Image (cartoon, grey):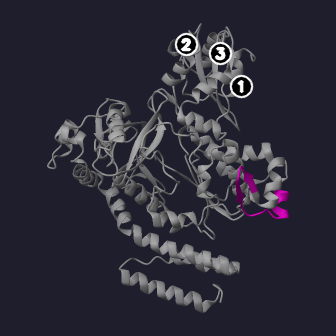
């Protein structure tokens, strides 16, 4: 029996309608339409079972997320009520933590009492509590059990460790389930749901010496086991790829699994630059990797990796000097990635590379908190009001306001509170309110608040960059770091007036790799090696360049760490190569 059989389709449609009615949920024919439309493909038993699995997931995801989805939609209509309710829940969850006991935050508190008793903090303020909690297994920030600590970059270049408690992981599970449900019950049609998930590699061996777990075991540890198991069935690259510690082997394998996935439909990554780095790796190593694609095997050490061998037609496509990537992956329907601030150009390139695909922005999803989530119904990313308490410091008057008091066209420094104990935590991101959905402010990511540059996720801080530079001795003359991007690569240029003994671009680049995210971006090929350029007149030419860009001479400031991205032509001008 095949799925195109009218009797089978009608019976399933009838049964499902009855099932939904019994559950008291509104029936949406769109949920069923994909399996019916897909019947025209005339697929075999294996693909028929895949379609049935997708259909089953559709039903289960809607049932599992129905209540949370309803709560989220209601919250967007009354953000104040939803956030105050969440604030009460946070107090109950955190009242037994050592830090909250110190502040005497009462369960009868309202928002004004919360603001008066709990100060705004950054990571440096919380680090002593986190270190003690990691060392002694105490409940400094939260009485909830910590599953693991997630690593991210700190202001000094040293790692920050964010506690992922069971309560916090429930928030991430909720977010993922809402996102999946929103997608598979949208206008998008998935036949295989084969997904390329940006698997996080373990390219750095931890030297923390702690008994606690640092980082997750796989990229689906953030969600419930059943949801992680289901997700794994649709992945183009296996999750155990995250255990590879050799950067070259990791990039080889990622390319091979990606290129072997001829039925790829969903691409989920962070920075768009990651995708282009993988394509560049393939282009630079195609002759070496070609035999592996033919055989479907790759050996690294004692481990052999297997994947689907490519047929002749697909191999021929890849042998072109510049492959038509839309023909290599003709079924890509969804691309999920960052699409704002410095990622906007990369996202635009991806949309042009796959014109038939729907490109969805990730929203503001930080290691410390999922602040927003994409919602098809709203056509934007909406604040996760039911799980994250959100405040913002208005850049105009420097006052802190809860999200329900935010104003159109105002910019805010994000402050979040979540159940892992990060209360009134300054996230370091600046957003601007662009519109409202129902009664809730919708905001765009404008960039980082600190003197930090983040072209592709490297999170390079000015203090850390100059700390690394100063290890080579006292600096002579004016110096400045410039972030540079062209159509295919991103890198930093250090401008100096003259050469400095003992300093080389390779040595400084190695020193900067002490920062976790800079090292990761370099190892993955998203960031090219740092360059050093010398010119005794570069500072004068910088003023000329600024005037050409329309700045008034009296307003031009000579920064030592630039957050604006420069082109290669502009850097040539600073070096004195162009007139």
**Nearest to viewer (mark 1 / mark 2):** 1
- Residue 412 visible somewhere in the drawing: yes
Instruction: Point out residue 266 in the picture as x, y percentages from the top left corner.
Output: 61, 60
Q: Earlier in the sequence, mark 1 or mark 2?
A: 2
Question: Which residue is more in the foreground, 158 or 19?
Answer: 158
Tell me if residue 285 is in the magenta stretch.
no
- SS at badge 2: helix
Q: Residues within 10 Å of mark 2 (few under 14, many from 20)?
A: few
- SS at badge 1: helix
Q: CA distance from mark 3 to mark 1?
A: 25 Å
Q: CA distance from mark 1 to mark 2?
A: 21 Å
Disc 3 and disc 1 in contact, CB within 8 angstroms = no
Question: Which residue is more in the foreground, 123 or 486?
Answer: 123
Quadrant including the C terminus? top right
Question: Which residue is more in the foreground, 247 or 446?
Answer: 247
Judging by the rendered image, the residue that carries numbered circle 3 is 503
- Residue 322 visible somewhere in the drawing: no
Disc 3 and disc 2 in contact, CB within 8 angstroms = no
* Residue at screen point 50% across, 24% down: 464
**Nearest to viewer (mark 3 / mark 1):** 3
Instruction: Point out residue 467 in the picture as x, y percentages from the top left corner.
Output: 51, 20
Q: Residues within 10 Å of mark 3 (few under 14, many from 20)?
A: some
Instruction: Point out residue 279 in the picture as x, y percentages from the top left corner.
Output: 72, 47
- SS at badge 3: loop
Judging by the rendered image, the residue that carries numbered circle 1 is 569
Q: Earlier in the sequence, mark 3 or mark 2?
A: 3
**Residues in magenta, as a range:** 298-317
**Nearest to viewer (mark 3 / mark 2):** 3
Judging by the rendered image, the residue that carries numbered circle 2 is 553
Q: Residues within 10 Å of mark 1 (few under 14, many from 20)?
A: few
């Amino acid at each position: 029996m095949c799925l195109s059989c009218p009797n089978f389709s009608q019976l399933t449609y009838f049964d499902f309608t009855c099932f939904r009615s019994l559950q008291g949920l509104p029936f949406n024919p769109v949920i069923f339409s994909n399996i019916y439309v897909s019947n025209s493909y005339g697929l075999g038993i294996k693909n028929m079972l895949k379609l049935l699995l997708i259909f089953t997931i559709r039903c289960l995801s809607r049932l599992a997320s129905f209540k949370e989805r309803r709560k989220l939609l209601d919250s967007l209509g009354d953000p104040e009520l939803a956030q105050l309710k969440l604030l009460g829940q946070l107090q109950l969850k955190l009242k037994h933590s050592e830090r909250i006991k110190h502040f005497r935050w009462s369960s009868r508190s309202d928002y004004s009492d919360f603001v008066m008793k709990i100060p705004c903090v950054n990571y440096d303020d919380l680090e002593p509590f986190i270190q003690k909690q990691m060392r002694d297994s105490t409940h400094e920030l939260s009485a909830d059990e910590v599953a693991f600590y997630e690593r991210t970059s700190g202001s000094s270049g040293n790692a920050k460790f964010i506690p992922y408690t069971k309560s916090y992981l429930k928030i991430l599970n909720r977010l993922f389930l809402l996102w999946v449900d929103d997608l598979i019950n949208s206008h998008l049609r998935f036949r295989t749901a084969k997904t390329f998930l940006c698997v996080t590699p373990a390219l750095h061996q931890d030297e923390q010496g702690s008994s606690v777990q640092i980082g997750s075991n796989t990229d689906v540890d953030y969600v419930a086991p059943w949801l992680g198991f289901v997700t794994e069935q649709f992945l183009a690259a296996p999750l155990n790829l995250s255990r590879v510690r050799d950067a070259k082997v990791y990039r080889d394998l990622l390319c091979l699994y990606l290129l072997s996935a001829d039925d790829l439909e969903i691409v989920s990554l962070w920075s768009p630059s990651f995708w282009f780095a993988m394509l560049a790796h393939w282009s630079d190593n195609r002759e070496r990797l070609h035999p592996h694609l033919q055989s479907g095997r790759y050996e690294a050490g004692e481990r052999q990796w297997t994947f689907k061998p490519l047929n002749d037609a697909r191999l021929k496509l890849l042998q072109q000097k510049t492959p038509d990537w839309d023909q290599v992956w003709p079924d890509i329907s969804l691309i999920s990635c960052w699409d704002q601030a410095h990622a906007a150009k990369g996202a635009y390139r991806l949309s042009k590379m796959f014109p038939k695909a729907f490109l969805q922005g990730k929203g503001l999803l930080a290691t410390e908190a999922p602040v927003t989530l994409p919602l098809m119904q709203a056509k934007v990313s909406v604040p996760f009001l039911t799980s994250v308490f959100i405040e913002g410091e208005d850049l105009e008057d420097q006052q802190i306001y809860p999200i329900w008091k935010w104003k159109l066209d105002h910019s805010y420094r994000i402050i979040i509170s979540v159940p892992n104990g990060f209360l009134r935590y300054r996230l370091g991101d600046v957003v601007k309110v662009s519109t409202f959905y129902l009664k809730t402010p919708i905001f765009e990511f404008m960039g980082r608040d600190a003197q930090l540059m983040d072209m592709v996720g490297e999170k390079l801080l000015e203090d850390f960059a100059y700390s690394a530079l100063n290890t080579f001795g006292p600096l002579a003359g004016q110096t400045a770091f410039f972030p540079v991007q062209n159509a295919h690569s991103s890198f930093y240029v250090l401008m100096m007036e003259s050469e400095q003994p003992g300093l080389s671009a390779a040595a400084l680049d190695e020193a900067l790799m002490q920062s976790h995210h800079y090292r990761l971006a370099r190892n993955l090929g998203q960031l090219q090696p740092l360059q050093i350029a010398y010119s005794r007149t570069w500072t004068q030419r910088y003023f000329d360049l600024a005037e050409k860009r329309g700045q008034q001479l009296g307003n031009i400031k000579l920064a030592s760490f630039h957050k604006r991205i420069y082109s290669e032509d502009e850097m040539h001008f600073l070096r004195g190569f162009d007139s």
